[in-house]
Image (cartoon, rainbow, N blue to C red):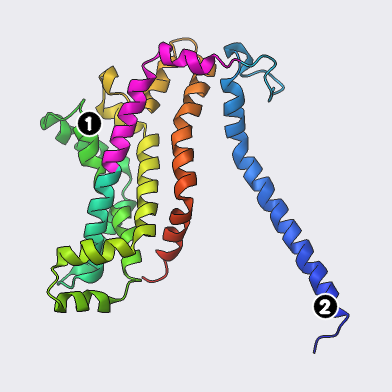
Amino acid sequence: MTTAASEPARGVFALVRRVVLYTVLGLAALAILVPFLWMISASLKRNNDVFTIPVQWIPKDFQWHNFADIWSRVPLATYLGNTVFLSLVITLLQVLTGSFAAYGFAKVRFRGRDVLFMLYIATIAVPWQAYMIPQYIMMQKAGLTDTFWSLILLQAFGAFGVFLMRQYYLTIPDELCEAARVDGLSEYGIWARIMLPLSKPALASLALLTFVNTWNDYMGPFIYLTSNDLWTVQLGLRSFVGQFDADYAMIMTGSVLSVLPITIIFLLGQRHFIQGIATSGMKG
């Protein structure tokens, strides 16, 4: 039985706990933001001021012209255009193939479905380095190296996207699909007209994760793209690294410009992203 005196004590304890929790979260967020703040600071410095000790967080002389000079130093517009193209195409194909395959694994009954799904998901555990060389040989024999097709074909299908969408589809009642079949709707129609509209949060999550991974991918373009006019922004930043020195101020400037699109996309879609991730694990 609670007493009147214990109620204020509980209120104070709850307040202290909340303050401590928010303080810890604030410090953790600040620790995560430190590298980004340093990157922005370095992008506004002269090259020889980037690594001064102690760290100079606020530049003495802001070099705003860095953000104008970088466009003439390297073909950054081409690099950004290539990156946008690859990210959009691969994201679209990942969402399309991942959601369609996930529908088959979640709502279509056939012999060996669960075993096939487990084997397919098990490929996530295989490190990319194990099949990197065979993939390159295949692309080389097909004459697709130094083309966007090599990256598109290799990254348009992903086991993680199938897993994410299947987990979300399992939260949708099977009765909806059965009623649609009774009404004469085909499996393609059920997927397009029922499943996709109900799975917008999961689709947004998959699209955001795929877009960010493709945008930040370095090894894939590094292996398959050799022509400068096909380079992505991640490869383009290497243009500022010379044989004996590197233009770190320009590297940081390019990094800031490459991070901005991802930041804007995440801020616009964070609500759907969090909702999709949270609901994808409700049933499995």
Q: Can residue 104 be seen from the camera position used here?
A: no
Residue 236 highlighted magenta (yes or no): no
Name the element at disc 1.
Answer: helix
> Residue 30, located in which quarter of the rendered image?
top right
Locate the C terminus by quadrant.
bottom left
Does residue 94 appear to the left or right of 138 in the view shown? right
- Observer able to see residue 278: yes
Identify the residue at image location x=49%, y=45%. 267
Q: Residue furthest bottom?
A: 1
Could you say which is closer to the camera, residue 266 or residue 133? 266
Mark 2: few, some, or many residues within 10 Å (few <14, many ≥20)? few
Residue 86, percent from left and from top: 29, 35
Residue located 60% across and 38% down the image: 33
Residue 176 in picture, x, y percent from top left: 26, 76
Q: Nearer the viewer, mark 2 or mark 1?
A: 2
- Which of these two is toward me, 84 or 243? 84
Asked whether residue 87 is drawn in magenta, I would say: yes
Q: Quadrant of residue 109?
A: bottom left
Tell me the magenta residue range.
63-90
Q: Is residue 82 left or right of residue 179?
A: right
**Left or right relative to 108: residue 128:** right
The alpha-carbon separation of the residues under discs 2 and 1 comes to: 66 Å
Q: Amino acid at mark 1?
A: Phe
User: Residue 1 location in percent, x, y?
Assistant: 80, 90
Mark 2 or 1, nearer chain start: 2
Would you name the residue on which mark 1 appears?
148
Say the numbered circle drawn on residue 7: 2
Q: Residue at x 34, y 52 (%)?
A: 125
Local packing at callout 1 (Cα closer than 10 Å; few below 14, some 14-19, many 20+) is some
Amino acid under disc 2:
Glu
